[in-house]
Amino acid sequence: MTCKEQQSFITELKALSRALRSSWGIDKSTLEIIGTRHQLFEKTIIQLIPQEVLEAPESGIPLLTTPATRKEFMHLVQESFRVNNPGIMSHLESSGLNSAEIDYCILLTLGFRGCEIGFLTSDRSHYNKSTAIRHKLGLAARDTNLGNHLRNLKDQKTHKI
């Protein structure tokens, strides 16, 4: 495993762990998808990365995950969220957001940070995307944290249905 692959692995594992810790409001099926991916990473790290490798990042153990599996994971999470949260989905769609912006909002609502979303989706333009979303949702640049706003919106839309 190259140093870059190790960093990629650890970054995704940290993002998944944080999403699981802050799982309030995440529907059961989406949480299961995130949990399954997290368990895969835990098993991989336990089985393949001995302590000396963790201390020496220049080691060479092949990583079993690929961007294709990450892409499939992201697709499953986003589809599960769409099915289980029709209230906020309707609001986001009626706000004029394109599909990439809606996918970004889904991940923010689930508790992922912008930089983690950029990593997971291989799209490093998260700041620009966030700015465009704020504009379409009618939020000023300094109104509130976009992730917090979306989670509050999700809670409001969930209770109305």
Image (cartoon, helix red, strand yellow):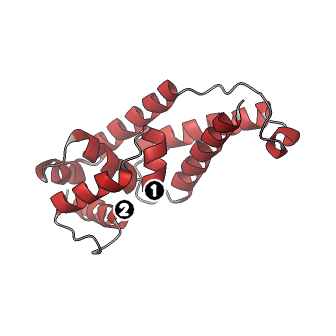
Q: Residue at the location (61% across, 45% down)?
A: 13
Mark 2 and mark 1 in contact? Answer it, CB < 8 Å. yes
Give the percent coordinates (x, y) of residue 76. Answer: 40, 33
Q: Which residue is mark 2?
A: 147
Whether residue 63 is situated above or below residue 153 in the rendered picture:
above
Residue 109: image quadrant is bottom left
Task: Using the image, tell me which numbered label, if any, was put on residue 113.
Answer: 1
User: Does the image show residue 112?
Assistant: no
Disc 1 crowd rating (10 Å Cα; few below 14, some 14-19, many 20+) is: some
**Structural distance between the alpha carbons of marks 2 and 1:** 8 Å
Whether residue 149 is situated above or below residue 79 in the rendered picture:
below
Identify residue type, mark 2: Gly
Whether residue 158 is situated above or below residue 3 in the rendered picture:
below
Identify residue type, mark 1: Arg
Disc 2 crowd rating (10 Å Cα; few below 14, some 14-19, many 20+) is: many
On-image quarter of the C terminus: bottom left
